Amino acid sequence: MAEVKLVHVWKKFGEVEAVKDMTLEVKDGEFMILLGPSGCGKTTTLRMIAGLEEPTLGQVYIGDRVVADPEKGIFIPPKDRDIAMVFQSYALYPHMSVYDNIAFPLKLRKVPKQEIDKRVKEVAEMLGLSNLLKRKPRELSGGQRQRVALGRAIVRQPQVFLMDEPLSNLDAKLRVRMRAELKKLQKQLGVTTIYVTHDQVEAMTMGDRIAVINQGVLQQVGTPDDVYHNPANVFVGGFIGSPPMNFLDASVIEDEKGVWVDFGEFKLKLTDDVGEVLREQNYIGKEAIFGIRPEDIYDAIFAQVKIPGENMVKAVVDVVEPLGSEKIVYLKVGDLSFVASFHPESQVKEGQEVEVVFDMTKAHVFDKKTKKAIV
Amino acid sequence: MVKVTMKYKITINLVAWIIGALLLIPLLALVMASIRPFSEVVTGWWKLSNAHFTLENYIDVIGRGFSRHVLNSIIIAVFATVLPLLIAGMAAYGFTSFSFPIKTMIFLTLVAIQVVPQQAVIIPLLKLFRDLGFYNHFYGIILVHSAFALPWTIFFLRSFFMTIPKDYEEAAKIDGLSDTMIYFKIILPIALPAIISVAVVQFIFVWQDLFFAITLLRPENWPASAGITRFVSRYNPNWGQLTAAGVLTILVPIVVYIALQKYYMKGVSGGIKG
């Protein structure tokens, strides 16, 4: 087991900057998720840790060892980094049986035959592959292939597991099952794991911590709860959560009652704590972005705290999407649109005017220019 | 997707069978002429009334040393297939997986070389052969066939290698293989159907060559394709021996094709499963 550290790492492909000044520390035994949209640089980051790409600048550490530092001419090849990688396509060698696929990395390391046999069988037992060892990859289902790929990684007993969207080729049902299995397995083995995904549900459910990346820049690192409830900027707030966080342009104003966000069509009173921060940072009278998650907007009937004129507003229901466990409701106040996640028993209908309540204790305010969270 | 109707199926089958039959008629004529006496063949090989069958022509042909020509063919074709494939495989892998200066230019040159006909280079080649002492030696003609095979085999294999996902190479790198071992242990086994396809085509191509054989070798070293001409006579056309030699000549490529047909079909239809 080992920690992994990236220090001011850059990766350029010609003129394109795929990773920009990435500094990230993955603790020993941690399950770290690299999350971001396609092309954000998360796979490039993983490949630099694996040694499949050389950073343009910066240092990569695995344990205490520098495995890449272009300025000092250090580049340890993948085979000597003591890592194992699971690919999106699984990359099982098609001409080898399941047994040989799992045993292959051990054979290359000249592990004695008996030891190989013992370890392959142990891993196969752990992953439920014992009766498939003689089969070729083409004779396996997607889930079984995925397990063989995991087996090939586990059998090496590496210091770090690197996983590049290993569940994305599975169907939805199997993905949910494998998600839980993978998480359990990681805890059981205790190996430092870096897992790349663009699926925020995978990130939230599996990771000890999530590193959110956008356009090659690390946006935020934190526990799933942290990145969900305290997004560092508009991107993180919008990327994590489904439906995403609502963002409304607002002016920050103050009167004798306190600090408000004014949308033109209506205004909402911020909590005293938030108001205090905005006042201290000189946002009164300035433009800002107000953010609130759909589940923090209630149908007034189901709201606990409703203060007309302060956190309550009349809106017109545009579209209702009943999902069983909740109702996704698209609302309009004048030209302003936002999404709410209502209680499943809410009886709102399309076209109806409804009173909605904003839970202002869950409100976020972002700087209009930098898009960074103020509170 | 086009819906396949029964009428369409019947038409396609009918056309395929007619083409197949038309192609088989000359082959059948060849075999019939080789196993029947000359007197019967001249009245029409297809007439089966009072037909007599004999292996006399084969015995005569072998007795006149034709087996030596078949052996020459085997030696030339085997080496002129294995040698270019060894080189082409590695070259194609290089073109697919590595970056090096003027890579595109070298590749385009290879593609362009394919259009040069054999006849265009034969005079300088013959001079070169005389100077180097390659004339009338198997290694000489093997080198020439290999050289002519390289552009198209590299082109074909490169196209196939490009369909192999990069993930295999990267997984092998992490597993601990060097670039050379990745080629031999991972890429080569995966590309086996494509390599065998190329091998079958090249083997048959070399086997049926007449031009290089008669220009670069003396008659005693001729392969079967050239040796067969020994049975052509202006005044006494011995159809029996000529056709028996013909059958013996095509026997080896047919056996090679049948033995490797499974891989050949996989190779030409492409696709990596697993």
Image (cartoon, rainbow, N blue to C red):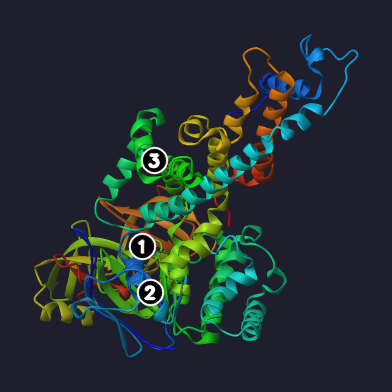
Q: In the rendering, which numbered label is found on residue A244?
A: 1
Q: Tag 1: Cα neighbours inside 10 Å, few (<14), some, or many (≥20)?
A: some
- Proximity of marks 3 and 2: CB atoms separated by less than 8 Å: no
Q: Position of residue A32 (x, y in %)?
A: 40, 78
Q: Position of residue B122 (x, y in %)?
A: 38, 32
Q: Is residue B113 above or below residue A96?
A: above
Q: Chain of mark 1?
A: A
Secondary structure beneath dot 2 equals: helix
Q: Is residue A373 above or below residue B258?
A: below
Q: Is residue B217 above or below residue B171?
A: above
Q: Position of residue B45 (x, y in %)?
A: 78, 15
Residue extending furthest toward the bottom: A64
Of labels 3 and 2, the one closer to you: 3
Name the foreground residue: A222 vs A297: A222
Q: CA distance from mark 1 to mark 3?
A: 76 Å
Q: Amino acid at mark 2?
A: Ala
Residue at the spot 47% in from the left edge and 85% down from the top edge: A191
Identify the image quadrant of residue A284. Answer: bottom left
Secondary structure beneath dot 3 equals: helix
Q: Amino acid at mark 3?
A: Phe
Q: Chain of mark 3?
A: B
Q: Of the residues under marks 1 and 2, which one precedes in the sequence?
A: 2
Q: CA distance from mark 1 to mark 2?
A: 33 Å
Name the foreground residue: B249 vs B82: B249
Residue at the spot 53% in from the left edge and 71% down from the top edge: A179
Q: In the rendering, which numbered label is found on residue A296?
A: none
Residue A256 at least partly seen: yes
Name the foreground residue: B136 vs A356: B136
Question: In this figure, which residue is indicated by the disc labeled 2?
Answer: A50
Question: In this figure, which residue is indicated by the disc labeled 3?
Answer: B129
* 3 and 2 marks on the same chain: no
